[in-house]
């Protein structure tokens, strides 16, 4: 992990120095002063290399005066979206072989300097827990990144908020990256209990509690596994606060509610998946990981909002006790469900948790996240998450937040109950079936199923199957778990803070 620190704007005496350069503009400020001190060496190098300051463009000048290395980093156009954080990500990538460096940020405001730090911190993430041997060039060397700014105190204040979000993102990435033999439902739930130290109220429901509640659809997914299921409820009451006389948390009034699918491993159950690529199903709990990371971020930055995070944790395994295709189970909502495909399991987990969340908390808005369907990847690839909703207002807010942080969502169609796509999940022997009649519109049919368990609450379903994991480095995300949705929903909640 890279440590981000802020210091007063002044050129350091030596070491590794980074100078951001705006696209198409000459050197200014500290960079121009250094260029003059070096007799125009920087300008000459820029001209020779045809360096224009485009985003992602780098120019290294070694042994420049007292500096071991001067990195001219293209900052792109001044009005480019997310310019500062993407610059930070590019810089930390370019500095992979260094242990410490300083960045001159005199062309950026205090908050933007913190955004540079955020981009660097997010891109520098590495999951090395199980690596016992590494080649020298595989080791993360960069330990300290010092940002030199005109307002270090203001930057530091902004950084404290940004860092809390980074901690939430990294926690979600850790959860998603863990192998399924380590992160099964009980272990996942235990890790959430550590969040109590941040001020979160955490409740864990085990097998017996879920049976007593009547979580028939969630339990049906887990019944083939040797590991028992869990549901975790995390409450952050940043607006309601606590009753100091009773020393207990007040009941939140119309909180924001976030629900995550947590299938810690998905074999498909009796409807077994093909062997090729099944190892990827360790991250079928990415929705739950995102919700947990979000709650970590909200508590870490002391968000002035009431937010509830609920995650349903199961393992979908084939065995003699597993649910069979054709079985009928009763949900917490009282509706009966005909399970025709045990690999359409995430919607069964969410059905019970969504209904419970509404009944208990009366949300203002409810958003669920799930790696729900491969069909959404066919439709949107790895550029957008699909969003399905019964509320135009909610969708608009999510779209704006997604654009702001680079976690984009695209609205998909959703029919009213009893109309259009919804008719495809009518069952001949139960209230609803868990798949449609064919392969068409798979992600939409899954959303229609979820909507059957939404009781009038403004709700959105984010299908993040194409966004939870990346096979290459992109922007602020290194290859691997992306924690997609943590920053999006953190930005979303800010619109409701006092």
Image (tube, helix red, strand yellow):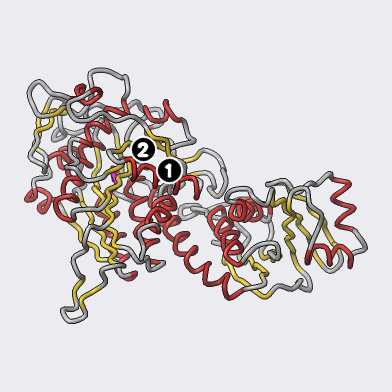
Q: Which residue is mark 1?
A: 399
Q: Name the element at disc 2.
A: strand
Q: Main secondary structure of the magenta part?
A: strand
Q: Nearer the viewer, residue 133 or 248?
A: 248
Upstream in the sequence, badge 2 or badge 1? 2
Q: Residue at x 42, y 58 (%)?
A: 168
Q: Is residue 397 above or below residue 421?
A: below
> With 12 as the anchor, is 387 left or right in this view?
left
Q: Do the numbered discs 2 and 1 sit on residues whose CB atoms are within 8 Å?
A: yes
Magenta segment: does it hold 261?
yes
Q: Which residue is mark 2?
A: 387
Asked whether the viewer can see residue 85, the reply is: yes
Tag 2: Cα neighbours inside 10 Å, few (<14), some, or many (≥20)? Answer: many
* Residue 9 at x, y percent in the picture: 70, 72
Q: CA distance from mark 2 to mark 1?
A: 9 Å
**How many marks are shown on the rendered structure?**
2
Q: Quadrant of residue 350?
A: top left
**Magenta segment boundaries in residue numbering:** 259-263
> With 341 as the anchor, is 273 left or right in this view?
right
Q: Residue at x 8, y 45 (%)?
A: 214
Q: Residue at x 20, y 48 (%)?
A: 229
Q: Quadrant of the C terminus?
A: bottom left
* Residue 383 at x, y percent in the picture: 49, 36
Residue farthest toward the right in the current orientation of the protein: 39
Tag 1: Cα neighbours inside 10 Å, few (<14), some, or many (≥20)? Answer: some
* Residue 224 at x, y percent in the picture: 18, 37
């Amino acid at each position: 992990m890279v440590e981000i620190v802020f210091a007063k704007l002044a050129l350091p005496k030596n070491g590794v120095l980074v100078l951001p350069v705006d696209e198409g503009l000459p050197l200014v400020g500290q960079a121009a002063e250094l260029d003059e001190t070096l007799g125009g060496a920087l300008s000459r190098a820029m001209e020779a290399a045809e360096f224009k300051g485009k985003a992602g463009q780098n120019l290294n000048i070694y042994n420049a005066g007292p500096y071991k290395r001067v990195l001219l980093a293209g900052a792109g156009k001044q009005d480019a979206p997310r310019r500062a954080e993407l610059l930070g990500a590019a810089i930390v990538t370019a500095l992979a072989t260094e242990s410490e460096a300083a960045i001159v940020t005199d062309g950026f405001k205090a908050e933007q300097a913190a955004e540079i730090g955020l981009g660097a911190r997010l891109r520098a993430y590495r999951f090395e827990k199980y690596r016992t041997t590494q080649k020298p060039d595989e080791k993360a060397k960069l330990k300290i990144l010092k940002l030199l700014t005109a307002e270090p105190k203001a930057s530091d204040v902004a950084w404290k908020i940004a860092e809390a979000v980074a901690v939430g993102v990294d926690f979600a990435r850790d959860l998603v990256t863990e192998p399924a033999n380590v992160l099964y439902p009980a272990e996942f739930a235990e890790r959430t209990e550590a969040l109590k130290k941040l001020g979160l109220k955490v409740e864990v429901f085990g097998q017996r509690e879920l049976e007593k509640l009547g979580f028939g659809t969630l339990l049906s997914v887990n019944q083939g596994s040797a590991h028992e299921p869990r549901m975790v409820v995390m409450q952050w009451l940043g607006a309601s606060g606590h009753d100091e006389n009773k020393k207990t948390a007040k009941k939140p009034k119309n909180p924001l509610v976030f629900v995550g699918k947590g299938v810690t491993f998905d074999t498909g159950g009796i409807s077994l998946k093909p062997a090729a690529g099944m190892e990827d199903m360790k991250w079928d709990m990415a929705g739950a990981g995102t919700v947990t990371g979000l709650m970590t971020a909200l508590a870490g930055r002391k968000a002035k909002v009431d937010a509830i995070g609920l995650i349903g944790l199961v393992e979908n395994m084939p065995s003699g006790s597993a649910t069979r295709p054709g079985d009928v189970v009763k949900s917490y909502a009282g509706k009966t469900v005909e399970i025709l495909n045990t690999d359409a399991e995430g919607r069964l987990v969410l059905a019970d948790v969504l209904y419970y969340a509404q009944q208990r908390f009366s949300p203002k808005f409810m958003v669920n996240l799930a790696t729900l369907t491969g069909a959404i990847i066919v439709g949107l690839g790895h550029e957008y998450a699909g969003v399905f909703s019964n509320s135009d207002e909610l969708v608009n807010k999510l779209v704006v937040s997604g654009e702001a942080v680079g976690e984009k969502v695209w609205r998909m169609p959703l029919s009213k109950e009893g109309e259009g796509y919804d008719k495809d999940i009518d069952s001949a022997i139960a209230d609803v079936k868990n798949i449609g009649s064919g392969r068409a519109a798979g992600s939409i049919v899954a959303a229609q199923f979820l909507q059957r368990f939404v009781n009038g609450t403004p709700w959105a379903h984010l299908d993040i199957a194409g966004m939870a994991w990346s096979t290459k480095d992109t922007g602020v995300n290194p290859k691997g778990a992306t924690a997609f949705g943590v920053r999006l929903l953190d930005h979303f909640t800010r619109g409701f803070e006092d």
